[in-house]
Image (cartoon, rainbow, N blue to C red):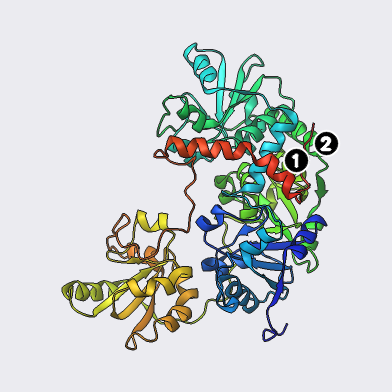
Amino acid sequence: MNQHQPIKYCGYKEVRTCLLEKKEIAFLDVREEDPHAQSHPLFAANFPLSRIEQDAYSKLPRRNVPVVTFDSGDQQDVELSDAYLAATRLRELGYSDVSVFEGGLGAWTAAGGELFIDVNVPSKSFGELVESKVHTPSLSAEEVKSLIDAQADVVILDARRYDEYNTMNIPTSTSCPGAELVLRVAELAPGPETRVIVNCAGRTRSIIGTQSLINAGIPNQVSALRNGTIGWTLAGQTLDRGQTRKYSDVSAQTKLSASQRARDVADRAGVKRASMIDLNAWRNQSSRTTYFFDTRSPEEFISGHIPGFRSTPGGQLVQETEMVAPVRGARILLVDSDGVRANMTASWLAQMAWDVYVLDGVQTVDFNEKGSWQAVLPGLPAVANVQADVLFSRLLTSAADDGVTMLDTVVIDFAKHAEYVRGHIPGARYVLRSQFKQALTALPFAKRYVLTCPDGVQAIFAFEEIKQLLRNRSDAQVEVLTGGTNAWQASGHALESGPTHLVSAPIDRYKRPYEGTSVSREAMQAYLDWEFGLVEQLGKDGTHHFWVLD
């Protein structure tokens, strides 16, 4: 590949044709998550410019996959746009088929393209389509509250991640993330007369969870809690906080029965089967993108997994597919240790028009790699480093110089906003790498600028770029904190918490209307109203190929 060849451009027709013909395409919205959530095409996966080096090799495993970078289109000089810069970085990382979507958001709209708001829109749209086609049964918040108050024979299962459940939950409910439902329900509701209610924060995961149990043919009556914790709150009812009820292990007989049910659903959905021979052949296939996902819990993954697989618990994978698999039209290979979670997850991905396989013939010995999943990274460039103890001494000098024209040292933190708020080096300035040019005027002058982030990786990748942007600041030195903020804390130095020195607006994450405990009633209702309209939007867009198992 000749990196000196001009960057190509493409438009609405080329992208839409790929989607309609189910060809592989990585259509990447390189804006930060909040502007992405305000308006984007259906299959434009959020892929922030600030994290390209950290995300590219894991999320775009095939270097010759067709990639199209997309942004707002507001920059008059295209070569100064985020989409163009992203395309350039991807070319430098070895991607050979990279184009810029000419004109960005405005051009998509002008061509008649449908625009969507929020995040994880393909999955949420699909969930609404499922309910509209098969009429997934549901109960209102008031009806569920009456069952609880009457001490009826009812089990409420929360299909969200455990951390979401722990933050707030429906009273009496138990955490059972989506892919676990078919595996665990027989022991959480041991009698067929027990009524099962599935909830999430809004609608999607409760619809998919409820329909999973129905599709698997469990004997219990199953319903979704209509509109989840949002509906519960809008009905004026109280949520619990800090609960820790979780599913437990199941017997061998329960596992066998659940695996038979799950395999039947997967077969009906047209899920394909793969062997260890296929796995080995697909690992380095240059003509096809394959994602390798382990659908079990993160704890199980850490205790032992197949090398090369990524931990993606099944319920969240269905909910957030484009976050880990931005190549639309790619192949997905799923694995578990029980024959339930991979098959149930695959049944949904098949209906979402993914080319999805489940790995058969897996033995316990195959789960021979331990530890958390690690992103595949390019080689780390050489940088000027500073150790935590040296930085600590310099910051004491800067504190003594407070009020002077030029400080000794200023720390620039590229952490995600939520990470920064939880804890950062005292006095560190929060700056988004993608917004650094805009932040320059608000940064104090200093003899040295030290770049950090939790593990130091993004700071390393940003080093040369930031050094160039700071070149007019009286020959200021730029360094990277070795090991990042984690190393600072490990050295025994204190952290500061809270949004104390925000130089960039915290647009790296969109505030979901169904998260946390401080969302307004108006925002929650607006979110539900938006979800109700997604099926109509899907019809207008016309590129999804979704279908629903009946």
Residue shown at 29% from the left, 75% from the top: 444
Q: Nearer the viewer, residue 102 or 304?
A: 102
Q: Position of residue 394 (x, y in %)?
A: 25, 76
Q: Residue furthest top?
A: 150
> For residue 504, what is the image quadrant?
bottom left
Which quadrant of the rendered structure holds the C terminus?
Answer: top right
Figure disc tally: 2
Residue in front for this viewpoint, 30 or 325: 30
How many neighbours does mark 2 have within 10 angstroms: few (below 14), some (14-19), or many (20 or more)? few
Q: CA distance from mark 2 to mark 1?
A: 8 Å
x, y (%) of residue 274? 81, 51
- Give the structural element (helix, strand or loop) at label 2: helix
Q: Earlier along the polypeptide chain: callout 2 or callout 1?
A: 2
122 lies above or below 32: above
Question: Residue 37: where, in percent of width, then height?
Answer: 55, 53
Say which quarter of the image contains residue 224.
Answer: top right
Under circle 1, the secondary element is helix
Q: Is residue 95 above or below residue 148?
A: below
Position above or below: 49 against 144: below
Report whether residue 534 is seen: yes
Q: Position of residue 425 (x, y in %)?
A: 31, 64
Residue at 62% over, 62% down: 106
The amino acid pointed to by label 2 is Arg
Q: Toward the viewer: 155 or 471?
A: 471
User: In the figure, residue 379 lies in which quadrant?
Assistant: bottom right
Question: Is residue 160 among what the camera can see?
Answer: no
Task: Please state if 372 lies on the left or on the right of 340 as rendered.
Answer: left
**Residue identifier under label 1:** 347
Q: Which residue is situated farthest in the front direction here? A: 110
Labels 2 and 1 touching (C-beta < 8 A): yes
For residue 268, which numbered disc appears in the image? 2
Give the residue type at disc 1. Ser
